[in-house]
Image (tube, rainbow, N blue to C red):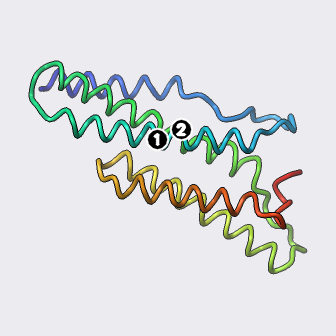
Amino acid sequence: MRLILSFLAITMFFGHLNTAQAHCQIPCGIYGDERIFDELDEHVATIEKSIAEIKRLQSETPQDIHMISRWSANKEKHAQELQDIIGDYFLAQRVKLSADDATDEQKELYANHLRHLHKIIVLTMKTKQTLDETQVTALKDTLKAYENLYFMPAEHDHKD
């Protein structure tokens, strides 16, 4: 069992070194917002599938233990990539800080973006910590709510 835990820890550590970045961090002006939301949905679906597979593999056979560790590492990897996209793409590049002369409505919209993005990050963290499907459902719902907010017709601040 100690060997399995060591293998899992090493796999998760080195898995973070290869995390793909959501977008470059130079002002290239090339964005694919719809594609990014599709990618986020794919990460959530992979987390959900990983949880289902971990729960399915309940025996103590060496092969099942091995597969559980692989599915656990997969769940961690996709959860981390989702968090990275939220930070690198939305928080660093797309959601613009409200200017000092912004209207109250613009300030509230900015705050609403931050609330949604923070909730997505926290729910993603909870999917790392547990096998509770309700966390995945809440993550999906919050991500969809944020997508609707992001593409609101009146919302143009992030389209610069």
Q: Which residue is mark 1?
A: 45
Residue at 62% in and 47% down: 86
Quadrant location, the N terminus = top left
Q: Quadrant of residue 76?
A: top left
Task: Depth check: give the residue in front, 51 or 25.
Answer: 51
Q: Disc 1 to disc 2, how far (Cα)?
A: 5 Å
- Place of residue 119 in the rendered image (x, y in percent of width and height, measured from the top left): 52, 61
- Place of residue 142 in the rendered image (x, y in percent of width and height, measured from the top left): 54, 60
Q: Which residue is mark 2?
A: 42
Residue 74 image label: none
- The kind of residue on which mark 2 rests is Glu
- Place of residue 22 in the rendered image (x, y in percent of width and height, measured from the top left): 66, 35
- The kind of residue on which mark 1 rests is Ala
As displayed, is residue 112 above or below residue 87? Answer: below
Residue at 70% in and 63% down: 149
- Place of residue 5 in the rendered image (x, y in percent of width and height, measured from the top left): 21, 28
